[in-house]
C-alpha cells in the first residue's frame, strides 16, 4: 500500500520527467551518482557541466587556458568563475564575459533575435540546461546533508532553486515558504543575494517566488496565472511552471531580456540628523507571471496584426507597470516581422509619461537589460530635441505628456518611418502648474476657473484628430479605462465589443497582497443642516445656486469646519495614531483652495488645544485669497515649521496630517498614508484614484480607514466596481449620430454647401489671406443672431455634438465621404466665431445663513464588490436640448436645500440641550474650575465629565434623547464641542 501513497518524491520525479522531455539533462543522484557528486558546494558550480560547455563552445579559449594553467586548469577556471559571480552577480556574468589571465570566456549564449545569423543560433544551441533533485548546498559540516528539492542549471551554473510540496501529504506552498525562511541559511554561498535568479515555492496548485532570502523577513510574491490557477485536465494546476516558465527558451529569454538588479530609492527620516535622507537598496527584479504573459502575447500578436494597431493594457496599481513598460519598450526596439527579416518593425519607441520618476527608472531598466549606451534618450531640452531624436531614429525616446501634441504632429508626417507610442497612465485629473502647461501645450480651451483637466480625454482627442495611421501603433497602459479609451486602444471582438488586450485587475492585486482594499473600513457621515434667508428675494440659476449654497454657506461655514475637524481628530487620536507602528499619516481632502486654508488653520488650532506636538501640512497649487489675505502652500507650511515639498515633509515624525485641494489626489505615493478624511464630492475614476492613495503596502500596514462626510457610499462603491476585474465596452460608437447632428445643423438654413466649399478652399490654401475667411463666417453669424435665444443654444449644441463625433470617429473609421471633413473644418471655426453669451454671475450675500448643523455617523459601509466584468455603454454624441439653465427664486432654492439636507433638530431636542447648558452654566464648582488658574486641557476634561453626567441625568426623564446621544459618540462629542465653545466664549452662557 505504501507505494500507492502520494509523496513529495513522486511530485519531484514527475516534474523532472517533464523537464527532461524539454531537453534538460538530469544531474540527480538516481540518474548518475558521479554527476550528482560533481557539484562544488563552495564554488556553487557543477564542475563537469561548466568545463564541458567551455570546451564545446569555445575550444580556442579552452586551449589558451590549458596552456596557462596546465593540469590545474579546471580548478583555476572554477575558482575564477566563482570569484566573478560573487563579485559581479550572476546576471552580469551570464550576460557578459569572464576574463582569466587575458582569456575571455562566455558562460551563456542568448537566443538570437532573428535567424539571419546561423552562427549565433549554433552557439545558443550549445547551452545545456540541467536539473538536480535534492541539491545539497551547505558548506557546513553539521548541515552537509541539507538539501533543496530541486535546482535548475545552465552550463553548470545554478539559476533557480525550488522547494516542492505535495498537498496530498498535508503540506502546501506555505510550508515551502517557511522552509526557506527558517531552514535555509541565507549566508550559504548558493543562497546569497544575486547568486541565483530566484527561489521558487511550488505545490500542486500554486507557486510563489523570491529573489532574496532574508530569513524570517523573506517576502514571497505570488507567481500564478490569476488569483487561482485554472484547472488543467489530467495534470497539476501548476503545470505551466515547467511547460511555460522553466523551458530552456523561456529561461534564456528571462536571462537575456528581463532580470536585472535595480537600485530602489526610498526617503525616510533620520533621527540622528533630524532630516529626511535617501536610502538606496539593491533589488533583483524577476518578472511576475502576468508581465511575462503580457510581453509574450504582444510579441506574438504585433507581427500578425502589423503596424497601425492599438493595444490597451489594463494593469492596476501593484502590477509593476513601470517595469512592464520598460520591458515592452526594450522588446519593441528589437522586434522583427519574422525571424528571416533584417529590418526592425519600429524605427523608434516613444514612451509618454507624466511621472517624473519613470524616466530614471525606465532608463535604468532598459540599460540594465540592453547594456548598450545611448539606447534610451530622455527629452530634456524641449520640442526641438524631441524632433531631432525622432528624425535620427533613436531607439527609445522618453518624454512627458506635455510634448504629446508635438509627437503626434512629427510622427504623423514621417510616413517612411514606423513608431510604437507607449502611453503611461496619464492621470485623469491634473491640476495647478501642470494643468496650466497642459492647457497651453495641448491647445485646449479650458476656462480659468477650472482647477482640473481630464488629460486622458484630451490625449484621445489628439490621437483622434489625426485619424488612423498605418505606420503608428499605440500601447495604452491604465488601470481605469474610460469608454473612449477602450474604443481607441481596445481589441474589437466578433460581437462588436471592445476589451483590453491584457488585464491585471484590482481584485488580483488586492488578493496577492500588492495593494490594500481601501473600502474595507469605509465610514459614512452626513451633514444635517437648516439654512435661512432674511434678505431680498431674486431669481437665480437653480443648479448653480444650489452648488453655491452648499459650497459657500455650508461647507465654508466656520462651525461646519470646526465640527468636521473635531470628528476627524477624535478619530485620528483614537484609531489612527498608533497604526503602522506609530507612523500612520492621514490626508484631509477638501473641495477648493479656500477651504484648504481654513481647514489647515483649524486642524492646527485644535491640535494645539489638545496639547499635541503633531502638525498638519497643506497642499494646493498657486495662491488663494481668504478674508483679504493671500496664502500659498509654502507660506502656510512654513508656519508649522516645514520648508520644502509636502511629500518630504510628511516623512518627519511630527507631520502626520495633510490637507489637500486638487493636489496629491493622483500619483502621490506615500506608503504610510493610512487614513483619508473625505470632505469633497468625487465620482467615477476620480473616486478610484483619490481613495487609492491609501492602497500602498508597507511593513505594519494591514488596513486603511476612510471617513466620508460628503459622498453617497453607493456611488463610491459603484466607481470601484467598474475597475475591480476587467472593463469592456459593449459596442462601438454609432457613426449615424454624426450624420443626424449634421442634418439638424443644415436644417437651420444658416449656410449652404457652397459657403462650406468656399471656406475650405480658402482655408486649405497655404498662401491664403486670413481676412478672406471672415466674411463667409460673418454672414452666418448675422443669420444666427436672428434666432431666438433657445434656438441659438440648440444650434451651438448640434455644432459641438457633430465636431466631437467626427473628431472621435475619424480615428476609428476611415470615411470615404470628404464632405464630412469639409463640414468639420467649417463648423470648427464657425463655432469659435459665433457670439458668446455672457455668463450670469451672482453672489450670495449675508442674508443666506446657516442656522442648525449636525454631522452624524451614518454607517460603516460593506463594499461588496462583485467578481464580474464591468460592461460600459457605448459613447453617445447628442446635443443638449437647452444650454440655458432654469431659474427660481432664491427663497425656493433655500427651501429645496433644507428639504434635502435638513433633518431638523426637534424643539424637544433643542430644549434638552439648552437644559444641559443651563445645568453646567449654573454650577458653581464648574465656574470655579473654568475661571480658575487651570490648564486648558484640565478645564476641558472637567467640563466634559460634567457634560457626560448631565447626559446620564436624562435617563429618568427623556430616555429617547439619552439613547440618541449614548449610541452616537460622534454626535455627542460634536455637541460637547459646541457647548464647550459657548461656555468659554460667554463664561457660562449667562454672561
Image (cartoon, grey):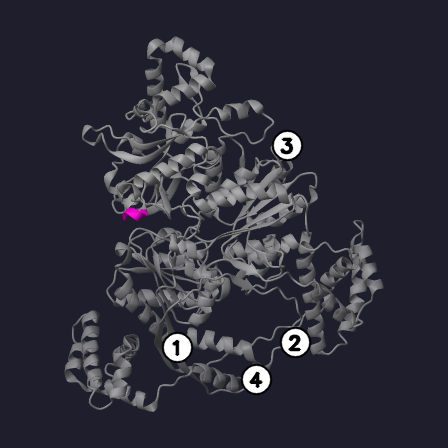
Residue receiving disc 4? 888
Question: Image point 25% across, 59% down: which residue?
Answer: 578
Mark toward the start of the polypeptide (3 vs 4): 3
The residue lying toward the viewer, choosing from 234 and 115, is 234
Check disc 2: other Cα within 10 Å, few if <14, some if 14-19, many if 20+.
some
The residue lying toward the viewer, choosing from 672 and 164, is 164
Query: In the picture, residue 751 is in which quadrant?
Result: bottom right
Q: Is residue 203 left or right of residue 144?
A: right
Tell me the element at label 2.
loop
Q: Which residues are magenta?
A: 167-171
Q: In the rendering, which numbered label is found on residue 920? A: none
Mark toward the start of the polypeptide (2 vs 4): 2
Tell me the element at label 4.
strand
Residue receiving disc 2? 882
- Label 2 vs label 4, nearer the camera: 2
State whether residue 886 is above or below residue 199: below
Check disc 4: other Cα within 10 Å, few if <14, some if 14-19, many if 20+.
some
Residue 696 point in image, percent of width and height: 38, 54
State whether residue 755 is above or below residue 560: above
Quick check: can you spot residue 491?
yes
Query: In the picture, residue 81 is in which quadrant?
Result: top left
| Residues at marks 2 and 3, CA–CA distance in whole angstroms | 59 Å
Residue receiving disc 3? 341
Residue 65 point in image, percent of width and height: 40, 12
Q: Are marks 4 and 1 in contact (CB under 8 Å)?
A: no
Mark toward the start of the polypeptide (1 vs 3): 3
Tell me the element at label 3.
loop
Amino acid at each position: 500500500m505504501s507505494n500507492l501513497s502520494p509523496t513529495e518524491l513522486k511530485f519531484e520525479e514527475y516534474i523532472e520527467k517533464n523537464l527532461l522531455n524539454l531537453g534538460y539533462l538530469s544531474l540527480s543522484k538516481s540518474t548518475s551518482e558521479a554527476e550528482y557528486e560533481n557539484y562544488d558546494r563552495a564554488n556553487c558550480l557543477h564542475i563537469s557541466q561548466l568545463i564541458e560547455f567551455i570546451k564545446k563552445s569555445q575550444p580556442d579559449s579552452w586551449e589558451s587556458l590549458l596552456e596557462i594553467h596546465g593540469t590545474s586548469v579546471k580548478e583555476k577556471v572554477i575558482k575564477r568563475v566563482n570569484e566573478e559571480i560573487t563579485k559581479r552577480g550572476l546576471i552580469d556574468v551570464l550576460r557578459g564575459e569572464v576574463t582569466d589571465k587575458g582569456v575571455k570566456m562566455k558562460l551563456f549564449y542568448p537566443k538570437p533575435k532573428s535567424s539571419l545569423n546561423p552562427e549565433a543560433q549554433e552557439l545558443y544551441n550549445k547551452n545545456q540546461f540541467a536539473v538536480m533533485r535534492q541539491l545539497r548546498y551547505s558548506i557546513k559540516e553539521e548541515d552537509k546533508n541539507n538539501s533543496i528539492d530541486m535546482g535548475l542549471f545552465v552550463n553548470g551554473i545554478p539559476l533557480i532553486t525550488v522547494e516542492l510540496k505535495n498537498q496530498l501529504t498535508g503540506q502546501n506552498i506555505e510550508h515551502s515558504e517557511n522552509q526557506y525562511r527558517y531552514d535555509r541559511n541565507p549566508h550559504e554561498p548558493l543562497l546569497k543575494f544575486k547568486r541565483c535568479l530566484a527561489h521558487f515555492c511550488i505545490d500542486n496548485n500554486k507557486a510563489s517566488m523570491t529573489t532574496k532570502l532574508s530569513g524570517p523577513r523573506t517576502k514571497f510574491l505570488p507567481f500564478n496565472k490569476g488569483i487561482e490557477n485554472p484547472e488543467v485536465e489530467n495534470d497539476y494546476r501548476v503545470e505551466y511552471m515547467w511547460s511555460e516558465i522553466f523551458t530552456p527558451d523561456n529561461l534564456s529569454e528571462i536571462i537575456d531580456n528581463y532580470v536585472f538588479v535595480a537600485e530602489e530609492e526610498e526617503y525616510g527620516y533620520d533621527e540622528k540628523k533630524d532630516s529626511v535622507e535617501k536610502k538606496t537598496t539593491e533589488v533583483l527584479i524577476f518578472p511576475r507571471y502576468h508581465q511575462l504573459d503580457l510581453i509574450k502575447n504582444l510579441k506574438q500578436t504585433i507581427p500578425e496584426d502589423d503596424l497601425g494597431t492599438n493595444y490597451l493594457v489594463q494593469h492596476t496599481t501593484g502590477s509593476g507597470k513601470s517595469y512592464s513598460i520598460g520591458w515592452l519598450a526594450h522588446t519593441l526596439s528589437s522586434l522583427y516581422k519574422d525571424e528571416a527579416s533584417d529590418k526592425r518593425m519600429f524605427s523608434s519607441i516613444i514612451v509618454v509619461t507624466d511621472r517624473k520618476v519613470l524616466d530614471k527608472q525606465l532608463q535604468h531598466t532598459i540599460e540594465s537589460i540592453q547594456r548598450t549606451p545611448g539606447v534610451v534618450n530622455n527629452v530634456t531640452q524641449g520640442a526641438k530635441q524631441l524632433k531631432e531624436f525622432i528624425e535620427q531614429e533613436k531607439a527609445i525616446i522618453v518624454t512627458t505628456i506635455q510634448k504629446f501634441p508635438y509627437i503626434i504632429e512629427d510622427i504623423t508626417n514621417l510616413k517612411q518611418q514606423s513608431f510604437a507610442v507607449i502611453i503611461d497612465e496619464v492621470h485623469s485629473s491634473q491640476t495647478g502648474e501642470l494643468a496650466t502647461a497642459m492647457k497651453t501645450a495641448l491647445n485646449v480651451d479650458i476656462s480659468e476657473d477650472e482647477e482640473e483637466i481630464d488629460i486622458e480625454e484630451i490625449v484621445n482627442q489628439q490621437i483622434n484628430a489625426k485619424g488612423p495611421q498605418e505606420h503608428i501603433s499605440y500601447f495604452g497602459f491604465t488601470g481605469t479605462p474610460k469608454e473612449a479609451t477602450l474604443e481607441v486602444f481596445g481589441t474589437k471582438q466578433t460581437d462588436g465589443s471592445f476589451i483590453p488586450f491584457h488585464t491585471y485587475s484590482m481584485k488580483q492585486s488586492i488578493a496577492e497582497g500588492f495593494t490594500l482594499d481601501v473600502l474595507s473600513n469605509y465610514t459614512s457621515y452626513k451633514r444635517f443642516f437648516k439654512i435661512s434667508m432674511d434678505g431680498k428675494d431674486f431669481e437665480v440659476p437653480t443648479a448653480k445656486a444650489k452648488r453655491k449654497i452648499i459650497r459657500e454657506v455650508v461647507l465654508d461655514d466656520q462651525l461646519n469646519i470646526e465640527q468636521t475637524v473635531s470628528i476627524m481628530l477624535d478619530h485620528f487620536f483614537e484609531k489612527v495614531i498608533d497604526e503602522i507602528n506609530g507612523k500612520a499619516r492621514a490626508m484631509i481632502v477638501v473641495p477648493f483652495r479656500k477651504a484648504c486654508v481654513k481647514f489647515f488653520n483649524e486642524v492646527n488650532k485644535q491640535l494645539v488645544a489638545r496639547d499635541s506636538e503633531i502638525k498638519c501640512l497643506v497642499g494646493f497649487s498657486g495662491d488663494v485669497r481668504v478674508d483679504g489675505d493671500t496664502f500659498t502652500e509654502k507660506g502656510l507650511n512654513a508656519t508649522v515649521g516645514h520648508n520644502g515639498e509636502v511629500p518630504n515633509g510628511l516623512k518627519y515624525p511630527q507631520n502626520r496630517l495633510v490637507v489637500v485641494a486638487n493636489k496629491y489626489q493622483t500619483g502621490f505615493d506615500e506608503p504610510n498614508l493610512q487614513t483619508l478624511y473625505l470632505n469633497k464630492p468625487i465620482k467615477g475614476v476620480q473616486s478610484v484614484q483619490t481613495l487609492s492613495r491609501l492602497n500602498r503596502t508597507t511593513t505594519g500596514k494591514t488596513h486603511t480607514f476612510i471617513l466620508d462626510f460628503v459622498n453617497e457610499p453607493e456611488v463610491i462603491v459603484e466607481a470601484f466596481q467598474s475597475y475591480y476585474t476587467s472593463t469592456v465596452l459593449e459596442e462601438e460608437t454609432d457613426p449615424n449620430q454624426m450624420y443626424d447632428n449634421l442634418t439638424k445643423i443644415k436644417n437651420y438654413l444658416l449656410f449652404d454647401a457652397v459657403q462650406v466649399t468656399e471656406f475650405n478652399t480658402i482655408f486649405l490654401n497655404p498662401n491664403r489671406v486670413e481676412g478672406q475667411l471672415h466674411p463667409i463666417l460673418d454672414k452666418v453669424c448675422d443669420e444666427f443672431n436672428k434666432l431666438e435665444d433657445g434656438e441659438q443654444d440648440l444650434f451651438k449644441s448640434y455644432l459641438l455634438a457633430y465636431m466631437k463625433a467626427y473628431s472621435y470617429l475619424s480615428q476609428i473609421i476611415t470615411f470615404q465621404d470628404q464632405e464630412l471633413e469639409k463640414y468639420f473644418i467649417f463648423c470648427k471655426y464657425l463655432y469659435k466665431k459665433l457670439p458668446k453669451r455672457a455668463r450670469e454671475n451672482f453672489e450670495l450675500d449675508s442674508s443666506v445663513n446657516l442656522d442648525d448643523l449636525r454631522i452624524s455617523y451614518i454607517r460603516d459601509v460593506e463594499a461588496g464588490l462583485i467578481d464580474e466584468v464591468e460592461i460600459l455603454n457605448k459613447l453617445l454624441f447628442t446635443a443638449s436640448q437647452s444650454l440655458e439653465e432654469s431659474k427660481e427664486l432664491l427663497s425656493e432654492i433655500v427651501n429645496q436645500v433644507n428639504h434635502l439636507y435638513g433633518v431638523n433638530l426637534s424643539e424637544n431636542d433643542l430644549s434638552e440641550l439648552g437644559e444641559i447648558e443651563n445645568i453646567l452654566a449654573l454650577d458653581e464648582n464648574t465656574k470655579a474650575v473654568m475661571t480658575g488658574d487651570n490648564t486648558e486641557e484640565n478645564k476641558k476634561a472637567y467640563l466634559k465629565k460634567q457634560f457626560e453626567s448631565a447626559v446620564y441625568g436624562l435617563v429618568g426623564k427623556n430616555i429617547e434623547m439619552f439613547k440618541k446621544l449614548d449610541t452616537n459618540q460622534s454626535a455627542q462629542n460634536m455637541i460637547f464641542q459646541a457647548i464647550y465653545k459657548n461656555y468659554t466664549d460667554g463664561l457660562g452662557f449667562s454672561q
